[in-house]
Image (tube, helix red, strand yellow):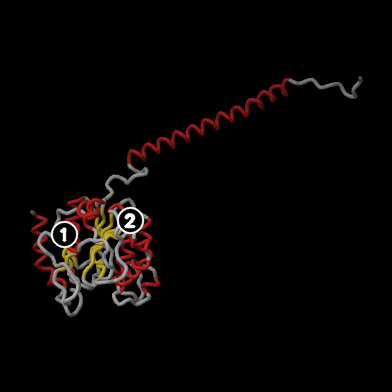
């Protein structure tokens, strides 16, 4: 067979080009493998460093086990009174490795709602600022920690301790509301600890455990619907409402005796109901109602207790 043109013979140049072309993919593949190995090495190194420094799944070193939240109302009391309140929390927190958080009522837009509602966004704020902390303790501005030796983890929130403290089958609103605390609850199920006084739930001192449930509680409690409802006692009556109407909240609620973390400084004026008055050795004294016109000013009422807590903390 004859061809119009003779077959071309491969030149030296084309042979060299083919050889180079065949080597190029191998070079690119080797370079990619090298880059992948470098990336894996860097990732492994960062992972090891994160584990060493505590940025992994657990809490970072230095995380406080408890944060004490007190919302300050600067215009309600003297600067000295506010300074004493802060010092009280700070000294107690320092003793146990806790942290303190002192937002003001002006930090949160409440519209026409009473400033007492500010405790709820303040608690939510604390959960954001201290995401690895286990317990968050709200303590009203008009209260003092009196016994520095009691720890939140062991005095209240330890599951076995909570088993012994919890008041079961107790009317949410005394003396005889139909909705009561569950009989079957165990200490490890409690995520929200609070006390009662003669009128009902007393949110001047309460503790929540870190977790999605506590965020749900605070968000539900702070719902605009409840803030606009004009409850007689604002967030206090709103809490009693949601506890009685939402079994999801009631199922994580632990009511403990008032003297455990919320003793009042004086006996109630009413003859019905029960309110526990502060006794030597109690954890907290609360000057409930001191900011009303019919009661002594908070600063005057706090003076004898201020001397006592300073003596207790220095001993």
Q: Position of residue 64 (x, y in %)?
A: 26, 51
Quadrant of the image occupied by residue 163:
bottom left
Quadrant of the image occupied by residue 60:
top left
Quadrant of the image occupied by residue 209:
bottom left
Within 10 Å of disc 1 (Cα), the crowding (few <14, some 14-19, many 20+) is many
209 lies above or below 5: below
Q: Can you tell which mark lies on residue 283?
A: 1
Q: Nearer the viewer, residue 38 or 158?
A: 158
Q: Position of residue 106 (x, y in %)?
A: 31, 69
Question: Please, what secondary structure does the residue beneath circle 1 have?
Answer: loop
Which marked residue is nearer to the observer: mark 1 or mark 2? 1
Q: Can you tell which mark lies on residue 129?
A: 2
In the image, farthest residue toward the right: 1
245 lies above or below 151: below
Within 10 Å of disc 2 (Cα), the crowding (few <14, some 14-19, many 20+) is few
Q: For residue 311, say whether it is visible.
A: yes
Cα–Cα gap, marks 1 and 2: 26 Å
Quarter that holds the N terminus: top right
Q: For residue 69, say whether it is visible.
A: no
């Amino acid at each position: 067979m004859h061809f119009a043109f003779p077959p071309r013979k491969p030149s030296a140049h084309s042979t060299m080009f083919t050889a180079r072309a065949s080597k190029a993919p191998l070079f690119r593949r080797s370079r990619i493998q090298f880059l992948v190995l470098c990336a894996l090495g860097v990732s492994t190194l960062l992972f090891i460093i994160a584990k060493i420094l505590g940025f992994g799944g657990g809490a970072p070193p230095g995380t406080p086990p408890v944060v004490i939240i007190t919302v300050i109302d600067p215009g309600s009391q003297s600067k000295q009174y506010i300074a004493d309140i802060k010092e009280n929390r700070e000294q107690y927190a320092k003793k146990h490795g806790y942290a303190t958080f002192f937002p003001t009522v002006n930090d949160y837009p409440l519209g026409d709602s009473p400033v007492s509602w500010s405790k709820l966004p303040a608690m939510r704020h604390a959960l954001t600022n201290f995401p690895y902390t286990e317990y968050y303790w709200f303590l009203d501005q008009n209260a003092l920690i009196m016994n520095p030796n009691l720890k939140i983890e062991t005095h209240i929130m330890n599951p076995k301790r909570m088993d012994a403290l919890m008041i079961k089958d107790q009317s949410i609103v005394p003396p005889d509301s139909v909705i009561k605390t569950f009989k079957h609850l165990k200490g490890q199920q409690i995520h929200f600890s609070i006390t009662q006084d003669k009128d009902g739930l007393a949110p001047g001192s309460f503790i929540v455990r870190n977790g999605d449930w506590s965020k749900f509680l605070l968000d539900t409690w702070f719902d605009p619907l409840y803030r606009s409802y004009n409850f007689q006692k604002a967030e206090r009556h709103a809490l009693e409402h949601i506890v009685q109407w939402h079994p999801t909240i009631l199922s994580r609620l632990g009511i403990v005796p008032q003297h455990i973390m919320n003793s009042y400084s004086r006996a109630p004026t009413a003859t019905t109901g029960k309110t526990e008055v502060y006794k030597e050795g109690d954890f907290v004294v609360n000057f409930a109602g001191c900011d009303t016109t019919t009661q002594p000013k908070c600063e005057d009422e706090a003076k004898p207790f201020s001397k006592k807590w300073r003596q207790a903390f220095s001993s």
